[in-house]
Amino acid sequence: MAGMDTARGGGVGRRRALVVVLLLLAVQLVSLARPAYACGCGAMVVDEKTTLSVNRETSAVRWDGKHEQIVMSLTVDGTAPDAAWIMPVPHRAKVELGDSDLFSQLAGLTAPAVKTRHYFWPHSSDWPFGGHGDTAAAPLPGARGPGVGVVGRERLGPFDVARLTATDPDALRDWLKSNGFQLPSSLAAELRPYVAQKWEYVAVRLAPAAPENRSYLSGTLDPLRLSFASERLVYPMRLSRLAKTPQSLGLYVFAPHRMEPRSSIGGKSPEVFFAGRIKPEGQVRDLAGDGTTFMTAIDQQFPQPQRISGDHELRRVAGDSPYQRVTYRYSLLKVGGMPAWILAVGGVFALAGVVAVVMVWLRRRRTVTHPMG
C-alpha cells in the first residue's frame, strides 16, 4: 500500500509540475502576443515595460514627378503613454501637422458604388412571408553628434519632430537613444541601406499630454504631413520588418496616371479598391491640387512583417482604366408599386379563368348545335 501511495503521490506531483509548465508557457505566449514595440511605416518604439501595436497605417501620397508629399495616419493600441518612431526620406523633408478630415473625405470618395438588382419571387423577408420588401446585401470587400546632423527640431501639436542626416547608422541610433528615442538594437542594421543611399530621417516622439495627465495611446493618432523632393514615387516600408505584429497598409496615391507597386515586397498582393480621375475638394484638394488628378487606392496586408524586403516603389500602369467596388442592393421587382409576382400570378389566374369560361361556352354551344335525338 505504501508503494501504491508513493506512486500515486509521484503521479500527482508530475501532474502539478505539468500544470506549472503549461502556465509558464501561457504567460510566455501572452508576452509574445503583446510585444514591447511594433512599427508602422518606420520603427515605432515604446518603453520596454509597456506595449504598443500599430493596427493600421493609412497614408495619402501625392507625386508630380519631382516632389512627393505623404500624409500619414497610424491607428494604435496598447499600454504606452508615449511613443517614438523614425521614417527615412530620400531628401530633406518639411514636416507639418496633417488634417484628419482628409481621410474621412477619401473614404467617401472611394466608397463602393451602390447598384440595385431585382428579384422576381418574394424572399422570406417579403410579403406574404414577413417584412415589407427591400433588403440590402452586405458590402463586398538639438545637438550634433559624430556622423549625425540635426537639420531642425520643432514641436508640432503633440509631436516632437527631429529632422536628421547621418553617415553612420550606429551613430544615428546612439543620437536617437541619447535624445529620448529608445529604439531597438536591430535598427542600426536596417538603417544601413538608407545611410548608404544618403537618405535623411524624420524622427517623431509623441507625448499627447502633460506627464500628470497622460493616458494610454489608443485609436487613430493625429496625422503628419511630410514633403520632400523625389524623382521616384517611393513609400518607405523597410523598417516595418522590425514589427512583431501583422501590419496593414492603406495608400491613397495621387499622380498624373494610375499607379501600382512594382512588387509585393514580402506581403500579400496589393489590392486596388479604387482607381479613377477625380476633381478634388476640401482637404483632398489641399493635398492633390486644384486640377483633375488620378487617384489610386491600394490596400495591402503583411501577415509576417519580417519578410518585408524593401520600400514600396510605385510605377505607372499601362492604361488609366478606372475601377470602383460595387455594393449590390437587392430589391423585389415591382410594376407600378405592385410586386411583379402578384401581377404575374394574378394574370395567370385571370387567364385560366378566361380559358375556363371559353371552354364552358364552347361546350354549351356544341350542345345547342347538335341536340340529342
Image (cartoon, rainbow, N blue to C red):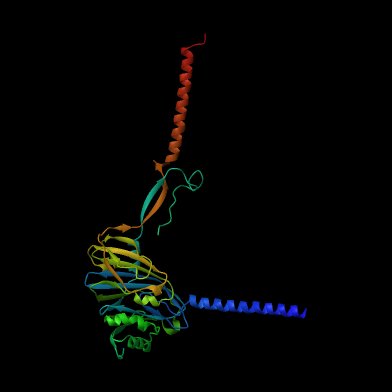
Residue sitting farthest toward the front: 3
Residue 139 x/y as whole percent: 41, 57
Residue 361, placed above or below residue 31 = above
Residue 336 horizontal/vertical position (percent): 39, 40
Q: Quadrant location of residue 90?
A: bottom left
- Image quadrant in which the N terminus is located: bottom right
Which of the 4 image quadrants contains residue 241? bottom left
Q: Tell me, yes or no, if residue 363 can be seen here.
A: yes
Vertically, is 114 above or below 220?
above
Left or right of residue 168: residue 361: right
Question: Count of labels shown?
Answer: 0
Rendered position, 53 above or below 165: above
Spot occupied by residue 158 in the image (x, y as percentages of width and height):
37, 79
Percent position of residue 370, x then y: 47, 12
Instruction: Spot the residue most to the right.
Output: 1
Q: Which of 39 and 127 is in front in this view?
A: 39
Q: Nearer the viewer, residue 24 or 272?
A: 24
Query: Which of 197 and 338 lies nearest the eye of the viewer?
Result: 197
